[in-house]
Image (cartoon, rainbow, N blue to C red):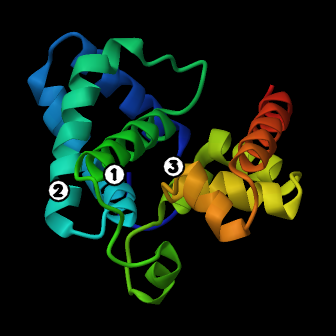
Amino acid sequence: MSADRSPPTPDDCDRLVAALRDVAGGDRAALAALYRETSGKLFAVCRRILVDGHDAEEALQETYLAIWRRASSYDATRGSPTTWMVVIARHCAIDRLRSRGRAPAAPIDEADNVADDRPSAFDLASAGRDERRLHDCLRELAVGDRSFITTAFFEGDSYTALATRASLPLGTVKSRIRRALIKLRGCLE
């Protein structure tokens, strides 16, 4: 993919699918190529969730280990390779955050004031044909539900943190997120 922020082309997507297929076959050179092409984006996802740069680097390493182990489970009919890898990066970063037993040093709202020329997790998920569909479907949700979804799934906040921030019972937040996810699934199908 190019260094600019233009959405991925079908050739970019096909190249990543082929690389994942090769990685699933145990091709280390394909993993190295995949790393060169996607590490900046995936590091941005990890860094957005983890305040500490070292933790983000460790989460990125865990991400590529997970990609190496799970490449055979990637299904191109279910979504783009970038989205699949972003989800893995997000999970690795959140797992690392939880394993440390601490929350980020600063609220996520303060991250808007930090200059970062890399694409945000939301920008990454919004790129490409599948991501555009997701973005369109997110816009169909009620504003509050859309905020819950984007904060939980793109910024890594827990349901408990969302409930506290919104001054709502945890069960209410969980129910609203579940209903919003069902609406998203229906829209994406």
How far, Cα to Cα, is label 3 from label 1? 15 Å
Foreground residue, 117 or 46? 46
**Residue that badge 2 annotates:** 57
In x, y percent, where is residue 102? 30, 60
Residue under the image location 38 percent in, 36 percent down: 88
**Residue that badge 3 annotates:** 8
* Quadrant in the rendering for residue 48: bottom left
Foreground residue, 86 or 15? 86
Is label 2 in a helix, a strand or a loop?
A: helix
Amino acid type, residue under disc 2 in the picture = Glu
Residue under the image location 19 percent in, 58 percent down: 55
Is label 3 in a helix, a strand or a loop?
A: loop
User: Marks 3 and 1: CB-CB under 8 Å?
Assistant: no
> Closer to the N terminus: mark 1 or mark 2?
1
- In this view of the protein, can residue 127 be seen by the observer? no
Foreground residue, 90 or 122? 90
Say if 143 sits above or below 71 in the image: below
**Residue that badge 1 annotates:** 42
Amino acid type, residue under disc 1 in the picture = Leu
Is label 1 in a helix, a strand or a loop?
A: helix
